[in-house]
Image (cartoon, grey):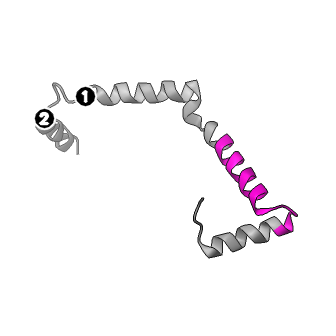
Amino acid sequence: MISLPREFLAEIDRVAREEHRTRSELLREAVRLYLRTRQAVPRDDPRVRQAVAIQDRLAAEDRTVGWDSTAELRRWRERG
């Protein structure tokens, strides 16, 4: 059993009537479509997984080793 707000249920019933379907048919189709689209999320794409892995690896690298913020600010001031 699921709980739905009355307004939402009224909208479901309206659409079901317009499409000459039962409420159950409409909800089954909606859930089926949701699950199908959820399975096709881009994170399942091998290219997306590879890109995320690269981003994670870059984020894990310590890019501040050997970097002197004071020296960097002085260089910027001298340029300007």
Query: Is residue 8 toward the left or the right of residue 24 in the image?
Result: left
Left or right of 63 on screen, residue 15: right
- The answer to which image quadrant residue 25 occupies is bottom right
Relative depth, front residue between 63 and 36: 36
Q: Magenta segment: does it hold 21?
A: yes
Identity, as a three-letter code, of the amino acid under mark 1: Arg
N-terminal label among 1 and 2: 1
Residue 11 percent location from the top left of the image: 71, 71
Q: Residue at x 64, y 70 (%)?
A: 8
Disc on res. 63 = 1
Q: Residue furthest right?
A: 20
Q: Is 51 contained in the magenta span?
A: no
In the rendered image, which quarter is residue 52 located in? Answer: top left
Total marks placed = 2
Give the main secondary structure, helix, strand or loop, of the magenta stretch: helix
Question: Residue 70 placed where, x, y %?
Answer: 11, 38
Give the residue displayed 54% in from the left and 30% down from the top. Answer: 48
How far apart in space, not on screen, are marks 1 and 2 (Cα)?
16 Å
Q: Nearer the viewer, residue 14 or 74?
A: 14
SS for tag 2?
Answer: helix
Is 3 located above or below residue 40 in the figure? below
Q: Which residues are magenta?
A: 17-36
- Mark 1 burial class by Cα count in 10 Å: few <14, some 14-19, many 20+: few
Q: Looking at the image, which residue is at 60% across and 67% down? A: 4
Q: Is residue 64 left or right of residue 22?
A: left
